[in-house]
Amino acid sequence: MSMAERTYPDPTTNLETERYWAAARDGKLLIKTCNACGEAHYYPREICPHCGSTDTEWREASGKGTIYSYSVMRRAETPYVIAYVTLDEGVTMMTNIVDADFDAIAIGKAVEVTFRATEGGMALPVFRLAGEG
């Protein structure tokens, strides 16, 4: 069984995340990196959660990663897959896996970012199995 197309609500945006969502509209996945300690972090925020520095900058992520954990929501009105994906840059983000047969999804499988329109026309980063789209 594969996931049917579902609708996504608009994300809440603020001054800290505005650039992240603008890049998503352009098909780019950004993550924050701290210039003080060198650590990447996700969810986008100005202050580094590792060292507390405000010297952070946006960097474009490769969009490639692996499934760390996932759950198939089969009883939802439109079944879907929610997952934690660890990007090649080292950060882990909660997301959805799309365009995949539910039985083909597994921990450790390679994924790549793609984007889905939200109800209000914004772009939401989601992932598909690598090489399948």
Image: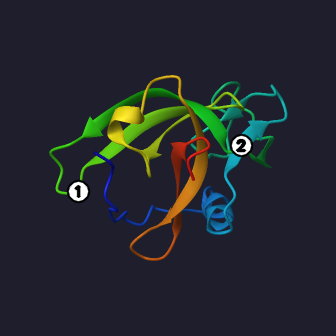
> 54 or 3: nearer the eye?
3
Residue extending farthest right: 35
Task: Kindly identify which numbered label has been placed on residue 32.
Answer: 2
Rendered location of residue 9, percent (x, y): 36, 65
> 78 or 17: nearer the eye?
78
Report helix, strand or loop for mark 2: strand
Q: What crowding class fits label 2: few (fewer than 14 Cα within 10 Å), some (14-19), or many (20 or more)?
A: many
Q: What crowding class fits label 1: few (fewer than 14 Cα within 10 Å), some (14-19), or many (20 or more)?
A: few
Rendered-image quadrant of the N terminus? top left
Left or right of residue 78, residue 40 in this image: right
Q: Which residue is pictured at 69% across the width and 58% down the height?
A: 28
The amino acid on which the numbered mark 2 sits, given as a three-letter code, is: Lys
Q: Quadrant of residue 88?
A: top right
The image shows residue 30, relative to residue 15, as above or below, that is: above
Rendered location of residue 61, percent (x, y): 73, 44
> 99 or 123: nearer the eye?
99
Contact? badges 1 and 2 (CB < 8 Å): no
Q: CA distance from mark 1 to mark 2?
A: 33 Å
The image shows residue 85, relative to residue 127, as above or below, that is: above
The amino acid on which the numbered mark 1 sits, given as a three-letter code, is: Thr
Q: Which residue is mark 1?
A: 78
Residue extending farthest bottom: 120
Q: Which residue is pictured at 53% across the width and 28% down the height?
A: 109
> 60 or 41: nearer the eye?
60
Disc 1 vs disc 2: which is toward the camera? 1
Rendered location of residue 82, percent (x, y): 37, 40
Q: Which residue is pictured at 55% across the width and 60% down the height?
A: 115
Of the numbered discs 1 and 2, the one sitting upstream in the chain is 2
